[in-house]
Image: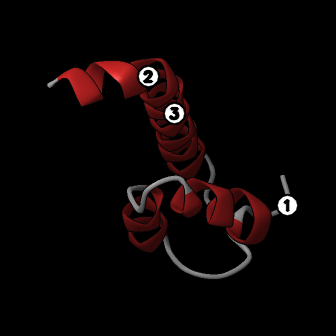
Amino acid sequence: MENLREYLPILIPIIILQLGLTIATIIHVLRHDTYKFGTRPMWILVAFIQTIGPLVYFFFGRGED
């Protein structure tokens, strides 16, 4: 349990970043209908793949507004 307390100052910002990216991705996917490739359900699933999922969406999946 003490090891966990040592890492909390590092883990908390990472967890907040992960949640923020996931929420931003889900909101963007739900508000926009066009994607470079793929479908809405696919991008929603990709959003839940750790930090890399939202980044993949914003770099490769997000269509032109």
Relative side of 43 to 58, left or right: left
Q: Say above or below: 37 vs 62.
A: below
Q: Mark 2 or mark 1, which is nearer the start of the sequence? A: 2
Q: Which colour style is shown?
A: secondary structure
User: Secondary structure under badge 2?
Assistant: helix
**Which amino acid is tagged 1?**
Glu
Q: Position of residue 39 (x, y in %)?
A: 50, 75
> In front: 20, or 25?
20
Q: Position of residue 57 (x, y in %)?
A: 64, 63
Q: Position of residue 56 (x, y in %)?
A: 65, 66
> In front: 49, or 1?
1
Q: CA distance from mark 1 to mark 3?
A: 29 Å
Q: Say above or below: 18 vs 52.
A: above
Q: Mark 3 or mark 1, which is nearer the start of the sequence? A: 3
Residue on which the image places disc 3:
14
**Which amino acid is tagged 2?**
Ile
Which residue is drawn at the image coordinates 74% and 76% (left, top)?
Answer: 36
Would residue 2 be seen by someone viewing this image from the given angle?
Answer: yes
Which residue is drawn at the image coordinates 26% and 28% (left, top)?
Answer: 4
Q: Say above or below: 11 vs 27.
A: above
Relative side of 24 to 48, left or right: right
Residue on which the image places disc 2:
12
